C-alpha cells in the first residue's frame, strides 16, 4: 500500500471520528417499534404502512429491546404458512453509547455483518437507532427514495461502455438497468455497496471489478463519494 493511500484513509477516518452516534441517529420518538406480542397480521400491516426493512422489537417497555426483526424473515410464514413465533426469527441486537464514533461503528457493522444498532444513554435507556444507511448518507449525502417527487438524474452515458453513476442510485434500479446482480439485499444504494466492499471511504481512483463491470471512485468531496465511473469490461 502506498504512503499516500494510508494518508488518505487516515484523514477520512479522522473526519469520521468527529461524528458521534447521537449526531446521526434516528431519535426514539421517530423510531417505529414492534411489540413482541403483536401477531403476524398486525406486523404485516405496520410494515406495509411504514415501509422499513428492519424493526427493533421490545418486551413490555421500549427500553427492553429483545431483538431486531428483519422483514425478509417473515417470508417463510407467508410461503409455508408456519405458525408464527417472532422469537424464532429475531436477530440479536447490539447496543452502542451515544458517544460511539462513526468510524468505529462502521467497522463494527462490517466485521459483524450488521446494519442497525440501538443507541443508549449513560443509564442504558434507548434514545435512538443508527443504521448503516445513516452512515452512508453521512458520507454520500441524503439518499433519495422512490417516493421523492423530483426526478433525479442518477447516471449518464459518456461513451459506448462508460457511465457516470451517482452513489445514491438504488441497487435494485442499478441491477435492472445494467443487468447485474449486486448484493447483498440489505444494502440499498450503490454507495452503500461500494463502502461495504472497501470497508472505508475510498479515495478518488480506487477501483474494483464485479461481474462485467469495473467500478472506479471518480469524485470524492471531503468524506463523501459523489460520482462513480462505471466501465463495461469483457
Image: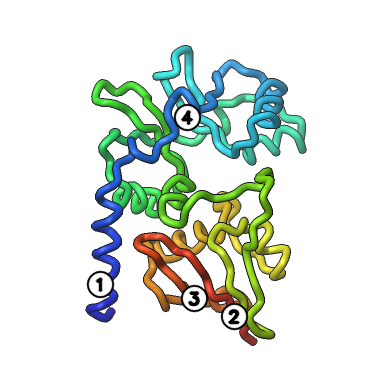
Report the front residue among 209 and 216.
Answer: 216
Residue labelled with disc 4:
67
Query: Which residue is depicted at the point 62% across and 24% down?
Result: 85
Q: Secondary structure at mark 4?
A: strand
Are the two marked residues, 2 and 3, in contact with CB atoms closer than 8 angstroms?
yes
Cα–Cα span, label 4 and label 1? 38 Å
Residue labelled with disc 3:
216
Query: Which residue is depicted at the point 27% across and 56% down?
Result: 15
Q: Earlier in the sequence, mark 4 or mark 3?
A: 4
Cα–Cα span, label 2 and label 3? 8 Å
Q: Secondary structure at mark 1?
A: helix
Query: Which residue is depicted at the point 51% across and 25% down?
Result: 57
Are the two marked residues, 4 and 1, in contact with CB atoms closer than 8 angstroms?
no
Residue 184's spot in the image, x, y percent? Answer: 57, 56
Q: Secondary structure at mark 3?
A: strand
For label 2, the crowd category at 10 Å Cα-Cα, with few meaning under 14, some 14 to 19 and many 20 or more, is some
Report the front residue among 85 and 147.
Answer: 147
User: Where is residue 122, by image quadrant?
Assistant: top left
Q: Earlier in the sequence, mark 1 or mark 2?
A: 1
Residue 183's spot in the image, x, y percent? Answer: 59, 59
For label 4, the crowd category at 10 Å Cα-Cα, with few meaning under 14, some 14 to 19 and many 20 or more, is many
Foreground mark, 4 or 3?
A: 3
- The circle on residue 231 is 2
**Residue placed furthest toward the front:** 150
For label 1, the crowd category at 10 Å Cα-Cα, with few meaning under 14, some 14 to 19 and many 20 or more, is few
Cα–Cα span, label 4 and label 2? 41 Å
Are the two marked residues, 4 and 2, in contact with CB atoms closer than 8 angstroms?
no
Residue labelled with disc 1:
6
Q: Secondary structure at mark 2?
A: strand
Amino acid at each position: 500500500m502506498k504512503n499516500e493511500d494510508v494518508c488518505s484513509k487516515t484523514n477520512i477516518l479522522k473526519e469520521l471520528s468527529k461524528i458521534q452516534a447521537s449526531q446521526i441517529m434516528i431519535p426514539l420518538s421517530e423510531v417505529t417499534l414492534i411489540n413482541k406480542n403483536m401477531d403476524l397480521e398486525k406486523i404485516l400491516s405496520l410494515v406495509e404502512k411504514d415501509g422499513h426493512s428492519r424493526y427493533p422489537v421490545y418486551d413490555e417497555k421500549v427500553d427492553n429491546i429483545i431483538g431486531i426483526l428483519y422483514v425478509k424473515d417473515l417470508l417463510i410464514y407467508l410461503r409455508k404458512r408456519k405458525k408464527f413465533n417472532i422469537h424464532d426469527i429475531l436477530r440479536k441486537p447490539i447496543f452502542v453509547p451515544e458517544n460511539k464514533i462513526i468510524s468505529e461503528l462502521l467497522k463494527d457493522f462490517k466485521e459483524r455483518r450488521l446494519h442497525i444498532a440501538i443507541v443508549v444513554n449513560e443509564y442504558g435507556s434507548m434514545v435512538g437507532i443508527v443504521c448503516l444507511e445513516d452512515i452512508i448518507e453521512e458520507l454520500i449525502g441524503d439518499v433519495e427514495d422512490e417516493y421523492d417527487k423530483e426526478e433525479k438524474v442518477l447516471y449518464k452515458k459518456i461513451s459506448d461502455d462508460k457511465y457516470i453513476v451517482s452513489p445514491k442510485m438504488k441497487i435494485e434500479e442499478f441491477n435492472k438497468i445494467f443487468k447485474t446482480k449486486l448484493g447483498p439485499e440489505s444494502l440499498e444504494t450503490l454507495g452503500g455497496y461500494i463502502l461495504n466492499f472497501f470497508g472505508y471511504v475510498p479515495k478518488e481512483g480506487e477501483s474494483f471489478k464485479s461481474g462485467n463491470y469495473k467500478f472506479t471512485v471518480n469524485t470524492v468531496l471531503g468524506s463523501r463519494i459523489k460520482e462513480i465511473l462505471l466501465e463495461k469490461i469483457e
